[in-house]
Image: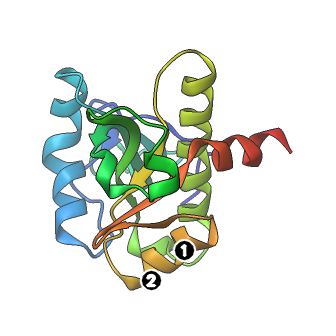
Amino acid sequence: MTLCTKFVELNKKQHDRKNFGCGVGQLDDFLQTKASNHREQKISKTMVLPATKPAASTNLHPIQAFYTTTQTTIERKTLSAAVAKALPNYPIPVFIIPCLAVDKKLQGQGIGKAALILALEEFYHASTNGISGIGVVIDPIDKKADAIYRKFGFETLTANRLFLGMGTVEELFNS
């Protein structure tokens, strides 16, 4: 099976959501049952890395990896004192990657890192085009994912949430 060279927006008429399996039930379920509805409701956007050719049995392109992007808010008190003191006392806008997964057959090949970089790049472009967000949050699904995100500079925000400031994201794409 040959992979496409770029992520594209999920299209349920072209992409095989049902046969994706990353090994984490809630991520598989999100892609299979919720991602398309969330896009239609303007809740989030899901990007997929499809195979170049459709499967003969379904005539749909198998999905090899996906990530989802949207916005949320965090409370000022969850940030470090140095950062928080310059912020208002109402919920602070941030970008979030609620889901990021690679099919089990392709894990360990750097596809997840590529998906993360693309999501961060999407947020970088949004922020340079007037969309407000002071950083990016992500909720690691396990310790392995946590370690990967920390290599990119994500730091603990709360017990199960990591944070990366937009200044760091800007450095990634301006260097």
- Give the residue at x 23% y 61%: 28
Can you say which quadrant of the picture contains the C terminus? top right
Q: Quadrant of residue 144?
A: bottom left
Q: Give the crowd class for mark 2: few <14, some 14-19, many >=20 residues within 10 Å.
A: few
- Distance, label 1 to label 2, CA atoms, is 6 Å
Amino acid, disc 2: Lys
Kindly state the secondary structure of the residue where label 2 is placed.
Answer: helix
* Whether residue 59 is visible: no
Mark 1: amino acid: Ile
Residue of label 2: 144
Q: Compared to 6, does 164 lie above or below?
A: below
> Among all residues in the image, which is located at the extreme top?
130
Query: Mark 1 falls on what kind of element?
Result: helix
Q: Looking at the image, which is closer to me, 6 or 121?
A: 121
The residue at 43%/36% (across/down) is: 87
Q: Which residue is mark 1?
A: 148
Q: Is residue 131 visible?
A: yes
Disc 1 to disc 2: CB gap under 8 Å: yes
Q: As rendered, which of 86 and 131 lies closer to the eye?
A: 86
Q: Quick one: label 1, few (<14), some, or many (20+) residues within 10 Å?
A: some
Horizontal side, residue 24 vs residue 148: left or right: left
Position in image of residue 128 (x %, y %): 63, 22
Q: How is the image coloured?
A: rainbow
**Residue 99: where, in percent of width, then height?**
33, 54
Res 9 → quadrant? top left
